[in-house]
Amino acid sequence: MPSSYLTREGYEKSEQELVFLRTEKRKQVAARLQEAMEDGELIENAEYEDAKNEQAFVEGRIKELEILLANAYIIDDGEHPEGVVVVGSTVTLKFEDGDESETYMIVGAAEANPRENRISNESPIGHALIGKQVGDKVKVESPGGAFYVEIVEIK
């Protein structure tokens, strides 16, 4: 089982970020470090400390992206079975406590963004929906308590 799922768009976005960090951002941080070292006393130099922290963050993010991309399973449109919720599906749900429906795309954890209605397959709702079909009433176990949703549509 792949360690992370990414849409084609998410994979490309992560690749672009990695290239930017390796080329542009590393140079910017190196220049900041060089400038801070030229200012003399490193022991009490806040700019030097800030630049070192930024360097550590950038290198950590580079390593994180390298691992993500090396272990990613790319979800392509049309690759999944029709009528069944899988990672990459766009699912319209009706919640038990209301008449309105909401639509979510099920994505891997690295691309999850609830503000954009992109929920992780590892989230309580995403996990509960995997393998289900239109018309199914699904119990979602969440930290706030259990609730039910009905699957109205799967794309």
Image: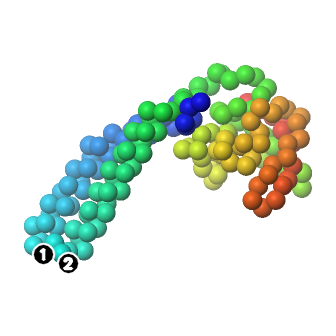
Residue at (24, 54) in percent of width and height: 28
Q: Mark on residue 130?
A: none
Residue type beneath disc 1: Glu
- Mark 2 — residue? 44
99 shown above or below 5: below
Q: Residues within 10 Å of mark 1 (few under 14, many from 20)?
A: few
Residue type beneath disc 2: Glu
Query: Where residue 104 sits in the image (x, y, percent)?
Result: 71, 43
Left or right: 29 as drawn, with respect to 21: left
Circle 1: element type: loop
Query: Where residue 118 sits in the image (x, y, percent)?
Result: 64, 45
Query: Where residue 45 sits in the image (x, y, percent)?
Result: 20, 74
Circle 2: element type: loop
Q: Are marks 2 and 1 in contact (CB under 8 Å)?
A: yes
Q: Is residue 78 visible?
A: yes
Residue at (27, 47) in percent of width and height: 24
- Mark 1 — residue? 41
| Inter-mark Cα distance, 2 to 1 | 6 Å
Q: Residues within 10 Å of mark 2 (few under 14, many from 20)?
A: few
Left or right: 122 as drawn, with respect to 68: right
Residue at (82, 59) in percent of width and height: 145
Image quarter in which the C terminus is found: top right
**Looking at the image, which is closer to me, 144 or 98?**
144
Q: Residue furthest bottom?
A: 44
Left or right: 16 as drawn, with respect to 111: left
Residue at (37, 51) in percent of width and height: 60
